Amino acid sequence: QKEVEQNSGPLSVPEGAIASLNCTYSDRGSQSFFWYRQYSGKSPELIMFIYSNGDKEDGRFTAQLNKASQYVSLLIRDSQPSDSATYLCAVKGAGSYQLTFGKGTKLSVIP
Amino acid sequence: DAGVIQSPRHEVTEMGQEVTLRCKPISGHDYLFWYRQTMMRGLELLIYFNNNVPIDDSGMPEDRFSAKMPNASFSTLKIQPSEPRDSAVYFCASREQGGQPQHFGDGTRLSIL
């Protein structure tokens, strides 16, 4: 069974610091990787996706992918209290149209 | 553009009753997904459709659950009879062809008493 693992947290960081969120996956054939942010009581919202090994940057967010290690991470620079949310890692396998989600990491940015 | 629209937003009903959740995907999206989210199990895929046809329903927990997509703009998820352990937030999501990410609706918070 395909699995996506995340540390449930909570991860607490001070305002302005870098938050580092990590995710590992079991299916070596996985091809696409997504990070969703979910505020309490709200729906998941896509913030980043990455397909190739290496880094992808979008504003304060950087997604990092290492397929050999089956590891994907999300860095949030200059963390703000508004970044406090649960971050879900999702993985799409080869030839599949469905996503497998991790249970999420709860991030708390302390002012 | 309107996003994925789900109704109702909240549903409270008694055990044994039939529950019907509704979803309108984003216009032009070929794929529709139904998820269930609980604290214990996280976000789980129940079923997904492509061009109104169910493709994978292996996540549907029991025969009490059924889903239909009679046309490209409407889908239902039905639970009959409902049980307290069905209490969860149910999300609908849709996406286009070609590897695009999924977009989620606001969800239905279901409580079975």
Image: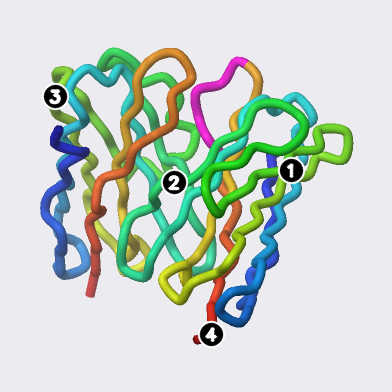
Residue A59 percent across, percent down from the top left: 52, 48
What's the chain of the residue with tag 3?
A: B
For disc 1, the marked residue is A25
Q: Amino acid at mark 3?
A: Ser
Q: Amino acid at mark 4?
A: Ile
The local secondary structure at tag 3 comes to loop
Say if mark 2 contacts mark 3, CB within 8 Å: no
For disc 2, the marked residue is B61
What's the chain of the residue with tag 1?
A: A
Which quarter of the picture shows residue A93? Answer: top right
Whether residue A37 is situated above or below residue B27 in the rendered picture = below
Residue at the image position 22 percent from the left and 17 percent from the top: B28
Magenta segment: A95-100
For disc 4, the marked residue is A110
Mark number for residue B73? 3
Cα distance between the residues tagged 3 and 4: 43 Å
- Most foreground residue, B28 or B55: B28
Q: Amino acid at mark 1?
A: Tyr
